[in-house]
Image: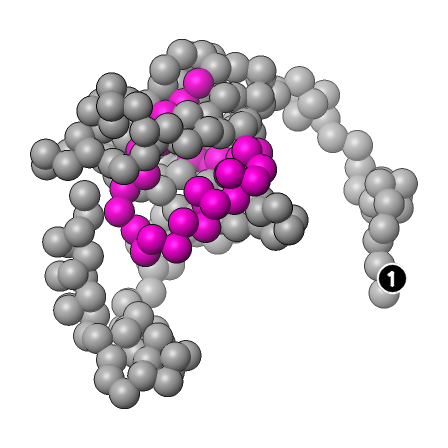
Amino acid sequence: MARIASVEQLRTLYAEPRERSRRKVLPALDIHCRSFIGLSPLVMLASFGADGRADVTPRGDAPGFVGIEDAGTLLIPDRPGNNRLDTLTNLLANPAVGLLFLIPGVDETLRINGRAEIRDDTELLERFVVDGRAPVTVLRVRVQEAYLHCAKAFMRSRAWNPAAQLPRERLPSMGEMLRDQLGLATAETQAEMLERYRATLY
């Protein structure tokens, strides 16, 4: 085996993309992109730090939680998390983002590439109040590319097939894994963790 280090080497191994694959990239959100985002309760957000390291984090809420300001702009509320601020810190150094929108039960996904800025405008925050709580910040994403991604990965993985889902007990609890990784004396139970999460969802 040899390390592949150039596009020319790659193209000796892979066929050229079909014309449809080349042409499907849109510069803005059309009616189908808007519909997909409106039905999606989950988006994976990729960002890149000043040191070049990549990071991917999930963002989720009720379907349509990502706001559409116009055909070229998305708004993503930043709900409470672990306060590491990996994504937000990355965006201060490099505004490039990649988004992958998912809809449970749908094998196709929507990919969006763009540039994001962190906002704390009062009027923006008020648009995303849930249970009386506003997010601390909102990401405003300027869309540069939007395109639908084929179903093959989800067909192969059977990700939405109930028969392919594992019982949660097949893995140690999050508390047990963190106990082992961090050398803690005790482990938070799965029930305790879920209760703590529920109290701080918004």
**How many circles with numbers are drawn on the protein?**
1
Q: What residue is disc 1 on?
A: 2
Q: Relative to residue 90, is residue 122 depicted above or below?
A: above
- 32 on left or right of 200: right
- 89 on left or right of 137: right
**Residue 34 placement: quadrant:** top left
The structure residue drawn at horizontal position 40% and vertical position 49%, both measured from the top left corner, is 85
Depth check, front residue: 174 or 47: 47
| Colour scheme of the picture | one colour
Depth check, front residue: 70 or 121: 121
Q: Secondary structure at mark 1?
A: loop
The single residue placed furthest to the bottom in the displayed view is 185
The structure residue drawn at horizontal position 20% and vertical position 34%, both measured from the top left corner, is 134
Amino acid type, mark 1: Ala
Q: Which residues are magenta?
A: 73-101
Res. 122 in view: yes
Res. 36 in view: no
**Residue 51 pos. (x, y %):** 64, 51
Q: Magenta stretch containing residue 126, yes or no?
A: no
**Residue 154 pos. (x, y %):** 48, 45
**Residue 149 pos. (x, y %):** 54, 32
The structure residue drawn at horizontal position 45% and vertical position 12%, both measured from the top left corner, is 71
- In which quadrant will I find the N terminus? bottom right
**Residue 182 pos. (x, y %):** 39, 79
**Residue 189 placement: quadrant:** bottom left
Q: Magenta stretch containing residue 89, yes or no?
A: yes
The structure residue drawn at horizontal position 45% and vertical position 50%, both measured from the top left corner, is 86
Query: Label 1: few (<14), some or many (≥20) within 10 Å?
Result: few
- In which quadrant will I find the C terminus? top left
Depth check, front residue: 92 or 22: 92
- 28 on left or right of 50: left
